[in-house]
């Protein structure tokens, strides 16, 4: 398993755009992040929220709060010092929550678009 490296907000924006997403600043952002972006795609139910925090502790705090707001029936994929990943299939909805170093991502989509969300996360190595 190769070491994972967090991407910058600029790199997230470039990768999302090259994958066909529209990217904008998150409105009413209360995450505490230094930079928050939202990627969406016309005709798709995939929404990807990206947050870059000042340090890993703040990113971890946001990850923990988001995980707490999702149903507890999800699956912890990885839990380590630098990287956390949690997935949840909840009826028609599918969520992927990832924290890497001082960044965090929340993907929200319908269950039938799960592969599109997972594919984008693979593209950015999250």
Image (spheres, rainbow, N blue to C red):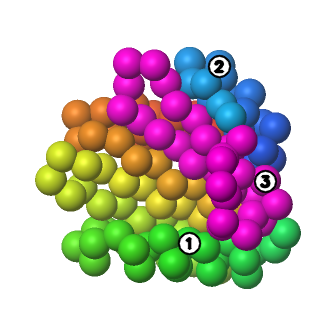
Residue shown at 48% from the left, 71% from the top: 66
Q: Residues within 10 Å of mark 1 (few under 14, many from 20)?
A: many
| Residue pointed to by mark 3 | 35
22 vs 85: above or below: above
Name the element at disc 2.
Answer: helix
| Residue pointed to by mark 2 | 18
Q: Position of residue 103 (x, y in %)?
A: 70, 60
Residue lying farthest front? 28
Residue 1 position by quadrant: bottom right
Residue 122 has which mark?
A: none
Residue 22 position by quadrant: top right
Question: Mark 1 and mark 3: span between their CA atoms?
Answer: 15 Å
Question: Mark 3 and mark 2: span between their CA atoms?
Answer: 20 Å
Q: Which contiguous range is marked in magenta? A: 25-53
The answer to whether 121 appears left or right of 12 in the picture is left
Q: Position of residue 97 (x, y in %)?
A: 47, 60
Pointer 1 or 3: first along the chain: 3
Residue shown at 38% from the left, 25% from the top: 44
| Residue pointed to by mark 1 | 63
80 vs 96: above or below: below
The reply to whether discs 1 and 3 touch (Cβ–Cβ < 8 Å) is no
Q: Residues within 10 Å of mark 3 (few under 14, many from 20)?
A: some
């Amino acid at each position: 398993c190769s070491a994972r490296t967090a991407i910058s907000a600029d790199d997230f924006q470039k990768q999302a755009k090259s994958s066909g997403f529209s990217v904008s600043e998150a409105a009413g952002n209360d995450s505490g992040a230094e930079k928050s972006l939202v990627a969406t795609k016309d005709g798709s139910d995939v929404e990807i929220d990206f947050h870059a925090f000042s340090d890993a502790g703040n990113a971890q705090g946001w990850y923990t709060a988001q995980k707490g707001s999702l149903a507890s029936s999800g699956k912890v994929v990885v839990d380590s010092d630098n990287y956390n990943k949690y997935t949840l299939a909840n009826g028609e909805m599918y969520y992927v929550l990832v924290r890497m170093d001082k960044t965090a991502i929340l993907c929200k989509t319908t269950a039938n678009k799960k592969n599109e969300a997972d594919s984008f996360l693979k593209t950015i190595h999250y």
